[in-house]
């Protein structure tokens, strides 16, 4: 990914979730990189993504009842 693609994605995310939330997320990821390295951070963030989807699905199921 080049810097232009990164910047475009970041602008889209700012529009979706806001600057402060994206800033906090980026800081969280950078902290993980410092502690665990890039490869382990990628695994952790991927698992967090799966967890978020599962949480959303369970939330929808609960509301639908």
Image: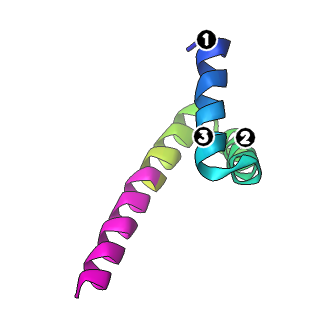
Mark 2 in CB contact with mark 1 (< 8 angstroms): no
On screen, 25 above or below 52?
above
Residue 63 vs residue 1: left or right? Answer: left
Rounded to the nearest whole Å, what is the CA distance between mark 2 and mark 1? 19 Å
Rendered residue at 25%/77% (across/down): 61
Rendered residue at 69%/47% (across/down): 22
Percent x, y for residue 52?
43, 60
**Magenta span includes 47:** no
State the residue in front, 52 or 65: 65
On screen, 38 above or below 58?
above
Q: Secondary structure at mark 1?
A: loop
Extreme residue toward the left, this view: 65
Residue ID for mark 2 = 30
| Comes first in the chain, label 1 or label 3 | 1
Rounded to the nearest whole Å, what is the CA distance between mark 3 and mark 2? 17 Å
| Comes first in the chain, label 3 or label 2 | 3
Q: Which mark is residue 22?
A: none
**Badge 1 density bin: few <14, some 14–19, many ≥20, Cα 10 Å:** few
Percent x, y for residue 58?
31, 74
Residue ID for mark 1 = 2
Percent x, y for residue 1?
55, 14
Rendered residue at 72%/40% (across/down): 30
3 or 2: mark nearer the eye: 3
1 or 3: mark nearer the eye: 3
Q: Write the start and end of the magenta stretch as one range.
A: 49-65
Residue 31 vs residue 46: left or right? Answer: right
Rounded to the nearest whole Å, what is the CA distance between mark 1 and mark 3? 17 Å
**Badge 3 density bin: few <14, some 14–19, many ≥20, Cα 10 Å:** some
Q: Secondary structure at mark 2?
A: helix
């Amino acid at each position: 990914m080049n810097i232009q693609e990164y910047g475009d994605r970041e602008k889209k995310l700012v529009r979706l979730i806001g600057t402060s939330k994206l800033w906090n997320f980026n800081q969280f990821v950078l902290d993980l990189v410092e502690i665990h390295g890039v490869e382990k951070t990628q695994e952790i963030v991927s698992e967090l993504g799966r967890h978020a989807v599962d949480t959303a699905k369970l939330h929808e199921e609960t509301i639908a009842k």
